[in-house]
Image (cartoon, grey):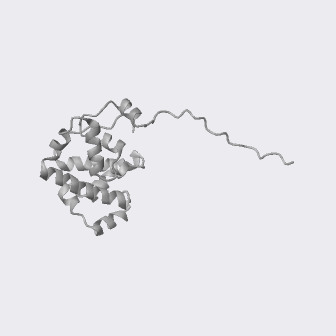
Amino acid sequence: MEGPPPQYTAKSIDDYLEHLSKGVFQAGISWRVVDAKWPTIRKAFHGFKVERVARMTDREIDALAKDERVIRSRPKIAAIVHNAGEILEIERDRGFRKHLRSFEDYEDLAKDLKTRFKFVGDSGVYHFLWTVKQPVPDWREWAKAHGKDWGPKTTPRPRIRTKAPAKR
């Protein structure tokens, strides 16, 4: 992915789950793979309807973990089901959008989300909040403060021998 990811206006808690889930699936995988499989992932997760996803059973999770049309990581699939339940609980308690806006400090909100949601770390929280148009710090400052360096690598590559060493 070149440049920042696109931003969206979340119209429902289903939209929040979808954008959070994209970051879950991306952990350790190329964005290109996630984007290529996203239409079938979306279908497999019932359009990210929070109430439906939160009710997914272990049998459904196991079936998805064997389905070649999706990213077959059972822990990630189970995390999305868990995360749907968390979003639903927050929504019923005080409203998910209101919860996101109740924090004055980005780091406090990030800590809360990382505690509640599974398979969501520093980068996942930043990506999620950015894509749903929540206030986030400047990317470069945030990355530096969190020890992230995705800039060009300056370490020279090791040289590869093209000839076998001479026999003694």
Can you say which quadrant of the picture contains the N terminus?
top left
Residue 47, can we see it?
A: no
Left or right of 66? Residue 96 is left
Q: Which of 142 and 52 is in front in this view?
A: 142
Q: Residue at x 33, y 63 (%)?
A: 64
Q: Which residue lies furthest to the bottom in this view?
A: 59
Q: Which residue is drawn at 33% across and 47% down?
A: 23
- Residue 125, image quadrant: top left
Residue 109, can we see it?
A: yes
Whole-percent x and y of residue 61? 31, 64
Q: Residue furthest right?
A: 168
- Residue 44, image quadrant: bottom left
Residue 75 higher or lower than 107, as above or below = below
Q: How many labels does the image show?
A: 0
Whole-percent x and y of residue 147? 43, 37
Q: Which residue is drawn at 31% across and 48% down?
A: 22
Left or right of 114? Residue 101 is left
Whole-percent x and y of residue 138? 33, 30
- Residue 139, image quadrant: top left
Whole-percent x and y of residue 127? 32, 41
